[in-house]
Image (tube, rainbow, N blue to C red):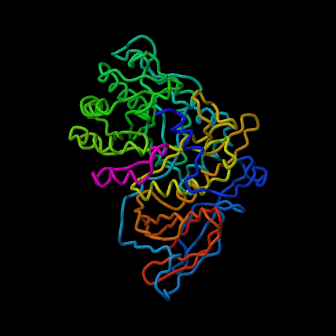
Amino acid sequence: MSAETTRRGFLRSSALGLAGTAAVGTWPWLEMKVEVRQTPTAPRGSRSGEISAWATSEKRRFAKQDPIRWRPVSAEPSHDAIVLSPDRKFQQILGFGAAFTDAACFMFNQLAAKQRELLFHELFHPAEMGLNVCRTCIGASDYSTKVYSYDEGEPDPELKRFSIEHDREYILPMLHEARTANPDLFLFSSPWSPPGWMKSGGSMLGGAMRQRYFSAYAQYFVKFLQAYAADGVPVQAVTVQNEVDTDQDGRMPACIWPQEYEIGFVKHDLGPALEQNGLKTKIWILDHNYNLWGRAIAELDDPGVRRYANAIAWHAYGGTPEMISRVHEAHPDAEMFWTEGGPDYTSPDYLTDWAKWGGTFTSALRNWCRSVTGWNLALDERGRPNIGPFPCGGLVTIHSQTKEITRSGQYWAFAHFSRAIRRGAVRFDSECAVPGICHAAFENPDGTHALVVTNAGPARTAAIRMGGMEAGIALDNDSVATFVWS
């Protein structure tokens, strides 16, 4: 499908029908330099019998609220109650994060060392945002300073030219610094295109993969993983191709991979190559939209694929998240990961669309995704560097001249999940019949519980019910709230 019907269309939509956005100038403190710490520390469970709460809405950003107390249930659950059933458990959570694109790393590298250290502490340290499932690019994406691979030029099947030298300037240093802030950082890596000589057309921009280079391309993955590991940046998973079903009209690094190509490559080339080289790196397939759920089922149906790959990577630019559950029903042991989605910096609600993203993240998690990873961690005020056709914004914006930091609505939505839900948490059942309210509940490894509630409608009161206890909650209009209790 065309670019217009993929990323751009998703960026311009609001799945929750938001209303009422604030102007950028309404919140001058959002424009402060990062030396002033902007956000509270991560939520912790409160005293027995109390629920700690944080809210983001028009007048506040992840602000601590007065504690809420449990009380005995006095009547049958009403239609405005979120009913929790901790005994009915679903998937285990890996974490949350965004992408270290070439562009994001370039922008991070523009910051003074102390400013970047403070920002990385805020983004990655477990006591802060705790972002811990992040993406890197194997060569150039559309968000890069230039088009590059690790072996460009004339055909080189033996990969004698292979080099990750480009990444040593600022990508690998940024990954090292992020891992210093969070040693538990899980990295997965995706190519937007093989080297041009492996493709029909000979360019990294658009086109399709040639089967005769499958073996060489598998070794390309091996060399990438080995080179990164040798530099102290191990990568835990790879996807075969970013967005397998589009060439983006030749306007950016992209490559079409037909279903039978991905099946053959995984079971005959990439899987065996990783195995033969002693690499434990996981393979995630598809890395594209919800509406390719049928392809995901067909690929998992192949025993050869399942020997090496048992995970699907999902984008939200086409289809609906319920389509993930169709794959789960066919293959309940397969793992699901949400691997891309970012804001539009030209949108008037770029700074305030937290409820849209709260709904998006909740839908992914309620449909079996183990992680949620956004798109660019950082871009400048014009969505650059960018060699592609899209107006994406960063999770944060770093102004190209002043180096001031602006936090997007997506950032504040992430805060409500990543600050409260720990790696190893398990999602459990939550039910509510109120239109406009999205919710997801989790039990952390330490026994604390976390509930994230997105209210896309007017301000309202509701209740949380668990067992024989309940607690009243107040939800601002167009808000995200997190509740944590022991």
**Figure disc tally:** 0
Residue 230 lies within the magenta run: no
* Left or right: 126 in relation to 156: right
Residue 328 lies within the magenta run: yes
Q: Is 133 placed above or below 213 here?
A: below
* Left or right: 422 in relation to 351: left
Residue at the image position 49 percent from the left and 87 percent from the top: 72
Residue 253 visible: yes
Q: Is 438 placed above or below 212 here?
A: below
Q: Tell which of 469 and 8 is nearer to you.
A: 8
Q: Tell which of 316 and 425 is nearer to you.
A: 316
Q: Tell which of 3 and 242 is nearer to you.
A: 3
Q: Is 442 placed above or below 323 here?
A: below
Residue 229 in percent (x, y) is at 41, 34
Q: Is 362 placed above or below 224 here?
A: below
* Left or right: 206 in relation to 46: left
* Bounds of the magenta segment: 315-339
Q: Farthest residue in the left direction?
A: 303
Residue 368 in percent (x, y) is at 39, 55
Residue 136 in percent (x, y) is at 48, 36
Residue 273 in percent (x, y) is at 28, 30
Residue at the image position 32 percent from the left and 20 percent from the top: 213
Residue 128 visible: no
